[in-house]
Image (cartoon, grey):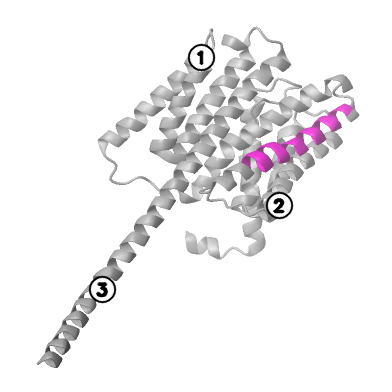
Amino acid sequence: MRLAARQFPPAAQWCLIVLGVTICYFATGQIGIQWAIVREQISPLWPAAGVALAVPMLLGPRFWPGIFLGALLTNIAIGPSLATVIAISAGNTIGPMLAYAVMRRLGFRTQLDRLPDAVLLVTIGAIGGTAVSAVLGTGVLVLDGALVAGDFWSTALVWWTGDAMGVLTVTPLLLLVPRFRLPTRVSPARWGEAIALAIVGTGTALLSSTTPAKLFLVFPVLVWAALRFRQAGAMLCSLCVCTLTIFAAVRGLGPYGSYALVPRMLHVQAFDATVGMTALVLSTIVLQRDRATAEITEAWLQITEMVDMIAPRQSLRSAMNQRRSDDLAD
């Protein structure tokens, strides 16, 4: 199978990868549409934005047509016009590609094993690049007449925060995929802890969205996930919390039902952004600590080996010097 894949010409490989990117963007776009609250296409959680930013990071910028085609297929069924859909799709492509270019120039590494990488993903990827897509897309809707000018900022805000949440929750998980390995020799206690974390995380996420608000309950769970299961556990926990919180906000359940649409979205997005950034930054710090500990341990082992090699020679040299001294004394 691998040999057959290598026999594909470069153009065919490029087309297959672009097709795969298109399918992934379209599939995650359909998930985001289920929570749409403005014109059935602007959602407070847009996972496709996370896919769009991960594509150039993992595959390279030359596969950008997959992002554009995925956005085009996602938006073409909900309009309002072909020209507007093309412009929105272009904005959905320009935003993540611009963020990728800036992050790469600033030294971003996809391993996410340094705190500066997490900061760049939050500031440039989740805040900067998504703002470009949101402003361009909302502006096009206003120019087309599908949206009144007075709703520009409120719509752009929901668009922007939805894309930002997609980047914060989905992109880190996708960046972990190349390093994913099936666990081997995992103790039953470890499996039990993972199951307990999943149950407690889901339970606290549901409980935090009830009245009165208990939003603070999720943060000890995030700390548990980051310390024990590193980035994978923390980001999966964050995605679960954000998904359930947004579902409650869209339905007007729990502490979000007493607010109008815009204040409700500001409330829930501020909470979800805090959850996402806490999970990402904390798990990255833990991973950086692990790497520093491993480097110190490796350096200590090398020093110990050098001492073990030098000690016998030093002892032999001392013995020879002592014998010469004795011979001179005689």
Looking at the image, residue 260 lies above or below residue 7: above
Res. 272 image quadrant: top right
Identity, as a three-letter code, of the amino acid under mark 1: Lys
Is label 1 in a helix, a strand or a loop? loop
Question: What crowding class fits label 3: few (fewer than 14 Cα within 10 Å), some (14-19), or many (20 or more)?
Answer: few
Magenta stretch, overall SS: helix
Mark 2: secondary structure: helix
Give the residue pinned by disc 3. 309
Q: Position of residue 314 (x, y in %)?
A: 23, 77
Q: Give coordinates of residue 112: x percent, y percent.
A: 53, 47
- Toward the viewer: 26 or 144? 144
Q: Which residue is mark 2?
A: 101
The magenta span reads 121-142
Q: Is residue 200 left or right of residue 112?
A: left
For the point 41% across and 31% down, which residue is it? 224
Q: Amino acid at mark 2?
A: Ala
Q: Which residue is mark 1?
A: 214
Q: CA distance from mark 3 to mark 1?
A: 60 Å
Disc 1/disc 2 C-alpha distance (Å): 40 Å
Q: Is residue 229 above or below residue 317?
A: above
Q: Which of 79 and 58 lies nearest the eye of the viewer?
A: 58
Q: Secondary structure at mark 3?
A: helix
Examine the rendering and report whether any part of residue 27 can be seen. Answer: no
